[in-house]
Amino acid sequence: MSHIPVGLAELFKIGLGPSSSHTMGPMKAAGDFAGRHLGTIQVTLYGSLAWTGRGHSTDKAVTLGLAGYRADEMDPDQAEQVWGEICGSKRLPDGTAFDPARDIVFDQLTAMPGPANSMRFTCGLESEVWYSVGGGFVVRAGEEEVVEEWAVPFPYGSGAELLKMAAGSSVAEVARANEEARGGDVAALVAKISGVMFDCIARGLSREGVLPGSLRVKRRAKDLYAGLRPGRHSVNDYAAVYAIAVNEENAAGGRVVTAPTNGAAGVVPAVLRYYREHCGGATDGGIETFLLAATAVGAIIKRNASFAGADVGCQGEVGSAAAMAAAGLTAALGGTNEQVENAAEIAIEHHLGMTCDPVGGLVQIPCIERNAFGAVKAMQASSLALLGDGTHRVSLDQVIETMRQTGADMGSKYKETSRGGLAVNVPEC
């Protein structure tokens, strides 16, 4: 059966912070355009990219993409060095003239049709508009979103279809069968993804200092972790600190895994480490089950709504991440398919309406702490689902559609433009 699925590699991209939609997506689009054009390129950023692009390092990401670098292959220190060299010389590594301060324009006045995160690349008489649609996914104007196509045995597109196809097996096994149909070593890919997640937590728990940007936010994860005491602090406290560690790394431009976005990158890793460190009987097989079940749920959200804060607010970022984490944890703990679907539904339901209003256009306040609460909500959603028998009144499909509709009704000032909410009520200094 022909299908265009979204799998592990799409939902869990390895790359650089601080934003999948404002950093990784523009870097990918710039690299594609530059790979097909010779000469000086001008870039114009619109919508949310224009309003918060500086705080999200969009100019740096675009420049690195034009220089031929890929987010999944680049070391954060190398990225900073190359960016500094280009800004200083006003030339790309191949000698092409390019001055980021001159050749990247943040256009906050023009209202472009289509998705909120849009950008135009121009080289001579050639010009293309691209959209960054969340989670590091990009699409060129006039084209369908490009996702690798492969035939799968279980082409589900909704929660109801997933439950039907998983009857007699499990949600994770359905996702695994689809991954195996693609080819490659599923266990190795899971190990790579989870390894980067755990490494990111470890780095975040070991580093001190102040995060980049005008807010001068102090890293807290190391001190918070040092103060945790078994028996005195709950597992929720541990998971919250794990999530903060990841998102401090993300805010610093470190190596993270989109899960499914960078702004929500701390939720899944935090809950996954909670499973590994705090759940008796945790195994490598359980980690694989966790990420596969999370993939199954994430694919449904991607198909029927959006991960992008610029499209639907933070409910699409942290809400989606919490749903994926809740589903993954429930599956890893032996929950039924109905309990897995219920856990994901509960997690999204209690993020509905959450706005995206980053102070100073930085993925720091309220984003870092919001990941901590997303992780705790995911764990609680899993617990509630496992206490029940999987029977529930509201379906996953219904809450995903509600999230989509709520995002469509939400004013643009609450969708990653920093023109409403906390962004206008909290002074930057």
Image (spheres, rainbow, N blue to C red):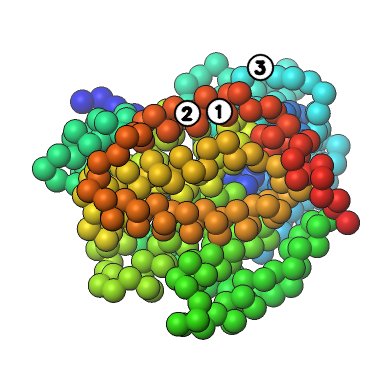
Q: Which residue is mark 2?
A: 402
- In the image, is 395 to the left or to the right of 108? left
Residue 84 can be seen, yes or no: yes
Amino acid marked by disc 3:
Pro
Q: Secondary structure at mark 2?
A: helix
* Inter-mark Cα distance, 2 to 1: 6 Å
Instruction: Specify the quadrant that holds the N terminus.
Output: top left
Q: Outermost residue toward the right? A: 429
Q: Earlier in the sequence, mark 3 or mark 2?
A: 3
Q: Residues within 10 Å of mark 1 (few under 14, many from 20)?
A: some
Circle nearer the viewer, 3 or 2 = 2
Q: Which residue is mark 1?
A: 406
Q: Which residue is mark 3?
A: 113
Q: Secondary structure at mark 3?
A: loop
How many numbered discs?
3
Closest to the observer: 81 or 9?
9
- In the image, is 319 to the left or to the right of 43? left
* Quadrant assignment, res 119: top right
Circle nearer the viewer, 1 or 3 = 1
Marks 2 and 1: CB-CB under 8 Å?
A: yes
Q: Secondary structure at mark 1?
A: helix
Residue 218 rendering spot, x and y as whole percentages: 74, 68
Closest to the observer: 275 or 155?
275
Q: Residues within 10 Å of mark 2 (few under 14, many from 20)?
A: some
* Inter-mark Cα distance, 3 to 2: 23 Å
Residue at image location 67% in from the left, 71% down from the top? 220
Residue at image location 24% in from the left, 54% down from the top? 335
Amino acid marked by disc 1:
Thr
Residue 27 rendering spot, x and y as whole percentages: 62, 42
* Inter-mark Cα distance, 1 to 3: 20 Å
